[in-house]
Image: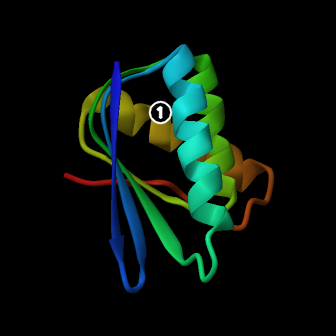
Amino acid sequence: MLRITVTTRPDGATVALEGRLAGPWVDELRACWRSLVAAPGARSIRIDLHAVTFIDTAGKALLWAMHEQGAVLAASGCMTRAILEEIGTKSRERGGPNGAAKGDD
């Protein structure tokens, strides 16, 4: 299960995830992401992965795509930080516009 909580602010939105980013929950996050970026006046979007316990291959691919489209990814656990580092490295290798993903302490 994955809980998705969207908090909007004047300067953008934060999408807080809690649980497993895997299976059908990847599609749920993708739908949420698409609605946020399609919204009129869409601004910065921060993806908070602090409470994510597992990310499968499809989840990693979605996070990478979101990062490439400008999302700021934030995490603190060892597993999620390692995945964000991998996404940042992949982005830099491909000359992506968004640099490295962010891992919080």
Residue 99 visible from this viewpoint: no
Q: Residue at x 36, y 61 (%)?
A: 14
Q: Is residue 6 left or right of residue 41?
A: left
Here the colouring is: rainbow
How many numbered discs sit on the rendered protein? 1
Q: Residue at x 47, y 42 (%)?
A: 84
Q: Residues within 10 Å of mark 1 (few under 14, many from 20)?
A: some
Determine the residue located farthest toward the left in the rendered image: 105
Determine the residue located farthest toward the right in the rendered image: 94
Position of residue 7 measured from the top left corner of the image (x, y, whole percent): 31, 63
Q: Is residue 90 left or right of residue 32?
A: right
Residue in the foreground of this view, choosing between 100 and 1: 1
Quadrant the N terminus occupies: top left
Dot 1: what SS? helix
Residue in the foreground of this view, choosing between 93 and 76: 76
Q: Residue at x 55, y 17 (%)?
A: 24
Q: Is residue 83 above or below residue 94?
A: above
Position of residue 58 measured from the top left corner of the image (x, y, whole percent): 63, 22
Give the labeled residue for mark 1: 83
Position of residue 98 measured from the top left corner of the image (x, y, whole percent): 63, 65
Q: Is residue 36 above or below residue 82?
A: below
Residue in the foreground of this view, choosing between 30 and 78: 30
Q: Residue at x 38, y 86 (%)?
A: 10
Position of residue 22 measured from the top left corner of the image (x, y, whole percent): 49, 18
The residue type indicated by label 1 comes to: Ile
Residue 41 visible from this viewpoint: yes
